[in-house]
C-alpha cells in the first residue's frame, strides 16, 4: 500500500531510464518538484497536501500497533531517552550524510546514477519550509514503516533476523531505484545499517532523526549551493 507500491513504480521508472536514448546521468530525478508552476499559492497547498498524505501510512502503523499492543513503545518511537536518541541521530546523520554524498558523486561520475535534483520548487518564501517538512516526512514515514514496523512484524512471524534485515534493506533500496543503481545500493547499505541498529536497540526514533537531518541538509543545501559549487551535479 505504501513503500512496496513505490518500489514497483521505481522499478518501472528505472526500466524507462535504461530504455531512453542517452547516458543515465544525463537524465534527472527530481525529488521535490513544483505541483502547480506559476501558481505559488496553489502549489503550496498541493505541497502541504503531499506531506500530509505522506504520513498517513505512519498513522495506520501506529493504530495497528495500539491494537496489537505496545503502541509507539513497540518500535521505540516514544520519549524514553530523548537525549541519547537525539545524540545518536545527529551522529548517524553526520557520518552517513557525508558517506552518502560521496557515494552519490562516485555513482554519478561512473554513469550509474541519474542527476538527482533535490528541489525544483520555485524561489518563493515557502520553499525552504516545505523542503524541511518534506525531509521530515520522508524520515518519519520510511523509518517507522520500513524499519520499525516491518522488522517487528517479521520477528513476530518468526522470520530469521538476517532474512528480515535483508527484506527491509532491499525494499528501501528498491523504492530509490528511480535514481539509478547508486540510489539503490546506497539506500540498501543504509537500510542494512539502520535495520541492524533497530534490531539491537529496538528504537526507531534516532533513525527518524538521522534520516530527517540527512534529507534536510540535502534538500536545503542543494538550494543554497547548486550552481555555486562546481562539484554538485546540476540538471542541464
Image (cartoon, helix red, strand yellow):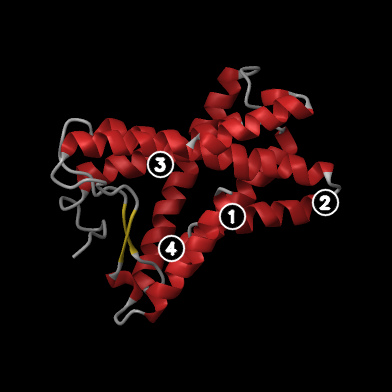
Q: Quadrant of residue 232?
A: bottom left
Identify the residue shown where x is 53% and y is 38%.
141
Q: Are marks 1 and 4 in contact (CB under 8 Å)?
A: no
Looking at the image, residue 180 lies above or below residue 138: below
Residue at mark 3: 215
Along the polypeptide, which appears first: circle 2 or circle 1? 1
The residue to which callout 2 is attached is 159
Q: Is residue 116 visible?
A: yes
Return the disc, 1 or 4, that comes first in the chain's sequence.
1
Q: Relative to the observer, which residue lies in front, 63 or 118?
A: 63
Q: For the image shown, how many numbered marks are present on the structure?
A: 4
Percent position of residue 28, x then y: 30, 63
Whole-percent x, y for residue 103 in the image: 44, 59
Instruction: Kindly indicate whether the residue at mark 1 contacts the one at mark 2 (C-beta within 8 angstroms).
Output: no
Question: How far separated are the C-alphas under marks 2 and 3?
Answer: 31 Å
Q: Residues under labels 2 and 4: Cα distance? A: 29 Å
Residue ID for mark 4: 178
Question: What's the mark number on residue 4?
Answer: 1
- What is the secondary structure assignment of the residue under circle 1? helix
Q: Earlier in the sequence, mark 2 or mark 3?
A: 2
Q: Are marks 2 and 3 in contact (CB under 8 Å)?
A: no
Between disc 1 and disc 4, the foreground one is: 1
Amino acid at each position: 500500500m505504501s513503500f512496496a507500491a513505490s518500489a514497483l513504480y521505481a522499478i518501472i521508472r528505472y526500466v524507462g531510464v535504461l530504455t531512453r536514448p542517452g547516458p543515465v546521468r544525463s537524465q534527472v530525478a527530481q525529488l521535490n518538484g513544483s505541483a502547480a508552476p506559476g501558481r505559488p499559492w496553489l502549489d503550496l497547498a498541493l505541497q502541504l497536501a503531499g506531506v500530509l498524505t505522506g504520513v498517513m501510512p505512519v498513522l495506520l502503523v501506529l493504530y495497528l500497533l495500539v491494537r496489537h499492543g505496545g503502541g509507539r513503545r513497540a518500535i521505540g518511537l516514544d520519549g524514553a531517552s530523548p537525549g541519547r536518541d537525539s545524540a545518536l541521530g545527529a551522529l548517524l546523520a553526520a557520518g552517513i550524510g557525508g558517506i552518502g554524498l560521496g557515494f552519490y558523486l562516485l555513482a554519478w561520475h561512473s554513469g550509474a546514477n541519474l542527476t538527482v535534483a533535490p528541489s525544483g520548487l520555485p524561489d518563493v518564501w515557502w520553499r525552504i519550509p516545505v523542503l524541511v517538512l518534506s525531509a521530515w516526512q520522508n524520515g518519519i514515514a520510511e523509518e517507522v514503516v520500513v524499519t520499525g514496523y516491518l522488522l517487528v512484524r517479521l520477528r513476530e512471524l518468526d522470520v530469521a533476523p538476517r532474512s528480515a534485515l535483508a527484506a527491509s534493506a532491499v525494499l528501501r533500496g528498491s523504492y530509490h531505484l528511480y535514481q539509478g543503481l547508486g540510489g539503490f545500493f546506497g539506500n540498501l547499505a543504509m537500510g542494512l545499517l539502520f535495520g541492524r541498529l533497530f534490531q539491537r536497540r529496538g528504537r526507531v526514533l534516532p533513525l527518524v532523526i538521522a534520516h530527517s537531518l540527512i534529507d534536510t541538509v540535502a534538500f536545503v543545501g542543494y538550494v543554497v549551493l547548486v550552481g555555486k559549487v562546481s562539484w554538485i551535479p546540476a540538471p542541464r
